[in-house]
Amino acid sequence: MAKLKFFDCNCSVGRVTHPHLYDIPDVKGLLEEMETAGIEEALVYHTLARDGYPPDGNSMLMDEIKGFKELHPAWVVMPHHTGEMPRPENLLPEMKQNNVKAVRVYPKLNFHSFSISEWCAGELLNALEEKRIPLILDLDTVSWDEVNTILKNHQQLPVITATCTYRNNRYIYPLLEKYDNLFIELSRFMGAGAIEDIVKRFGSRPLLFGTNMPQYTGTAALSLLTYADINEKDKQSIADTNLRNLLKEVWK
Amino acid sequence: MTEYFERIHEGLPITDVEIIDLHAHLGPERVMHVPANDPGSMVKTMDLCGINKTVVSTTSGINVDIVLGNNLMLKAIRAHRGRIYGACFVNGHYPELSLDELQRCFAEDKDVIMIKIHPYSTSCNMKDKRMKKIYEYASDRKLVVLVHTWLDGDQYGNLDIFADVVKDYPDIKWIMGHSGGPYGSYHAVKLTQEVENIFLDTAVSMCPARQIEYFVAEVGSERIIFGTDNPFLDPRPQIGRVGLADISHQDRVNIFSANARRLIDF
């Protein structure tokens, strides 16, 4: 078997207040982690955009990853109502200009403190859906009922659940039965035999390789996939192709 | 790039080093769907990545009934002799029954080789007086006791509680399950440096970057055992974590199995 090519959909740069262990705040540290694991490319957001102020973090991200072809920007966004974030008709051209092809949101009180429901985030979700821009959700900030509503109301919007844990199959399976636009990131999807079971029931298309580097090591999610008892084509799809295919559809 | 980089990337099992998993379970689980939870599926998963032996306690024992759980453990040992070994599960809320179970299980099958306690799931504090006879049983026989530990948020088995108990039983070989969890590395290492008879465990779902390297640098690879939490967690991520860590080959051998063999006569 040839070495798989890996495109990680869940990486960050920037410092965090409570590191798991080491302080790995910059691009250099992330690239070292990628090299240790053998991961070629990554979709990256800035921790300042998540834990601080999104506009500042997005701007810092662009500065820090400039010139690194293997790193692709994912912005953290919010609805526009307070004026902190441009209206969608202005935000998306700015994203296009910066080659940003995926976004993350952190709704919920005491995260970014907005509602992901239609009355608050509807215009943003509509705009993202129209341009097929993947929406990455951190499951610490949205409920499964909210995920269901987004999937139902925006069926052309690719929704990626990051940090989806090994405890979530009973939520995921009914959603995968209903919707084609749900994608599962693998960094914490570690129940025994989970990859094989998803592939058997739903195919490899809903699974996206992710690691949460540099907070986590990339080596764990990597060997979870390389040792999976599925065919090589499905492995490569999960490792790289599924994400690449999603990003190809953006702006069309 | 480590000596196992290509092998792991190619999905080939590690075959030149024995791998012994001292932290595993068995069976379906209340809080989650586990696709590969039966003994046969577990052994198949072990074969895919090169794990030779595993030591299990059962989810039924941890969550419900220690007798039922230990019976399932004994059945799995018999069905997969030489691949599956047993950790007798005990619960301080049932002190007499726990002692009976220890005597029964260790007498019934030579491949019952450890004791497992889970203070959090049983809601029984490690310092509860009813645990004393269990510890004495283990201490008299110099057994290995695997304890589920977490840095904080666990009023029954956090690292402070764990520290208080282990110091009183120097003849027990204590495995600090999960090494105190994903945020516990610093405190787990500090405790391991202070107390001789503690071993760190690799099993964790949130795998901090460079944690294996940190453990090796701070306490030495002789104090780390290979655990996976299979099937609660898939064991395969731990192969990558140890196999691709920036440590020496001898460190990897120690973690994968040499330390386990020093602790237990398989």
Image (cartoon, coloured by chain):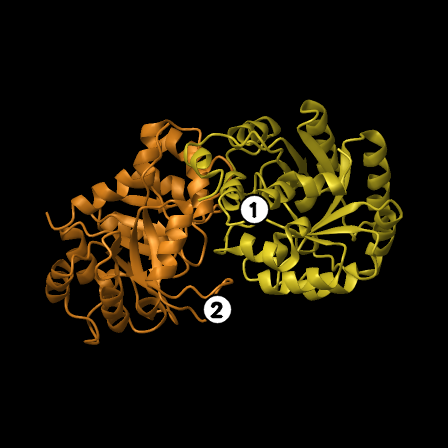
Observer-nearest of B151 and A34: A34
Judging from the image, what secondary structure is the residue with disc 1 in? Answer: loop
| Residues at marks 1 and 2 touching, judged by CB atoms closer than 8 Å | no
Q: Chain of mark 2?
A: A
Q: On the image, numbered disc 2 is attached to which residue?
A: A18
Q: Which chain is orange?
A: A
Observer-nearest of B253 and B104: B253
B136 relative to B110, above or below: below
Residue B93 placement (x, y as % from top left)? 78, 53
Judging from the image, what secondary structure is the residue with disc 2 in? Answer: loop
Residue A107 placement (x, y as % from top left)? 33, 65
B218 relative to B84, above or below: below
Q: Kindly identify the amino acid type of the residue bearing the numbered disc 1.
A: Ser
Measure how far apart labels 1 and 2 are at the Cα level. Answer: 29 Å
- Residue A138 visible at all: no
The disc at residue B248 is 1
Q: Give the residue furthest to the right.
A: B140
Q: Kindly identify the amino acid type of the residue bearing the numbered disc 2.
A: His
- Horizontally, residue A246 falls left or right of residue B71, namely left
Residue A247 placement (x, y as % from top left)? 20, 47
Query: Chain B drawn in what color?
Result: yellow
Q: Quadrant of the C terminus of chain B?
A: top right
Residue B190 placement (x, y as % from top left)? 66, 65
Q: Chain of mark 1?
A: B
The reply to whether label 1 and label 2 mark residues of one chain is no
Question: Circle 2: is it few (<14), some (14-19), or many (20+) Cα within 10 Å?
Answer: few
- Horizontally, residue B89 falls left or right of residue B244, namely right
Where residue B228 sits, quadrant-wise, is top right
**Rendered residue at 55%/50% (across/down):** B204
**Rendered residue at 58%/37% (across/down):** B28
